[in-house]
Image (tube, rainbow, N blue to C red):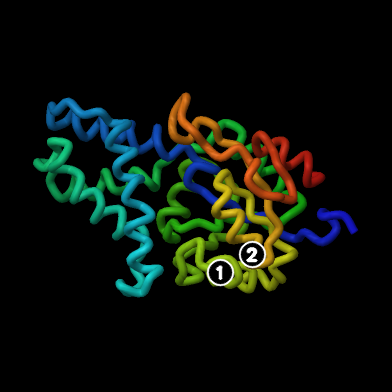
Amino acid sequence: MQLTDSLKAVVFDVFGTCVDWRSGVAREVALAAARLRVAVDALDFADAWRGRYQPAMEEVRSGRRPWTILDVLHRESLDALLPKFGLGALDEAARDDLNRAWHRLDPWPDAVGGLARLKRRYVIGPMSNGNVALLVNMAKRAGIPWDVILGAETSRAYKPLPESYVRCCAMLGLAPGEVMLAAAHEDDLRAAAAAGLRTGFVARPLEFGAGRRTDDGSRGRWDVVATDFGELADRLGA
C-alpha cells in the first residue's frame, strides 16, 4: 500500500515551517522602537524572544507550572526583554500590540499555494504550540486555508510530549498512522514518528536568517522530504 492510500490528513508545524517568524517579529519590533526613537537591533530582539520559547514551555511541560497558553508565555518573555533592549518605556497598549506580532506573521512564499493544493485531497490544519486565537488571527490575515485548528491548546500539551500528537489525531477521528506531520524541525518530526504519525520534512533554510544552520532532513528517515510545500503537494499526489 502506498503512503497516499492510507493518509487522510496533513498537519503542520507553524512557526518556521509555515510562516517566517523572524522577519515578522523583527518588523514589528522595529516599528515599536521607532515610536520611542530608540535604536534597536530588531533581528537580535526577535532571536532573543524566540530563544525564550522552549524554556517557557518547558515550565508547563514539566508540570512546574499549570497549563498556560503561548500568548501569555510570549508576553512574559517580552516584558523581560524590553528593558534589556532599551524599550522598557513601552506602555501597556504598545506591549499588548507588540505581543500580537506573533499573530501577524507572513507565510513563506510557497505556503498558501501549497496548502491550497493539499487541502483538495487531505484535511489540513496546524499542529502547533500556538494558541487558538493566535493561529486563527494568523490564518485570517495571511489567507492560510486551514480546515481545522489543532495544537497545544486543544490537546492541552506542548510538543514534543506524545499526547500533543496523539490527542490531535483523535480529535480528527483518525489513527496516528493516517496523519502526517509536516515540519522543518527534525526533533518535532522525530517525536511525531514515535507517536505513530507519518512524517514530512520541508526545508526552511532561511528560518534563522541567511547563512545560519537549519535542519536539512538528513537526521531521520522521514516518509517525505521536500524543498517546499509545492514539492510536498507533488509527493503526496495533491
Horizontally, residue 129 falls left or right of residue 233, namely: left
Question: Where residue 12 sits: x, y (%)?
Answer: 59, 52
Q: Amino acid at mark 2?
A: Ala
- Measure how far apart labels 2 and 1 are at the Cα level: 8 Å
User: Mark on residue 208?
Assistant: none
Q: Nearer the viewer, residue 36 or 157?
A: 157
Q: Nearer the viewer, residue 125 or 186?
A: 186
- Label 1: how many Cα within 10 Å (few below 14, some 14–19, many 20+): some
111 shown above or below 189: above
The percent coordinates of residue 36 (x first, y second) are 13, 32
x and y percent of residue 237 in the render?
81, 45
Q: Earlier in the sequence, mark 2 or mark 1?
A: 1
Pick out the residue farthest to the front.
219
- Percent of width and height locating residue 56: 32, 59
Give the side of residue 125 with respect to residue 71, left or right.
right
Query: Marks 1 and 2: in contact by CB < 8 Å?
Result: yes
Numbered mark located on residue 162 in the image:
1
Name which quarter of the figure residue 178 lies in: bottom right
Badge 1 amino acid: Pro
234 w.r.t. 180: above or below: above
Residue at 45% of width from left, 71% of height from top?
156
State the residue position of label 2. Answer: 194
Q: Residue furthest left?
A: 89
- The quarter of the image holding the C terminus is top right
Badge 2: residue crowd in 10 Å (few <14, some 14–19, many ≥20): few
Q: Residue at position x 59%, y 48% from top?
A: 183
Secondary element type, mark 2: helix
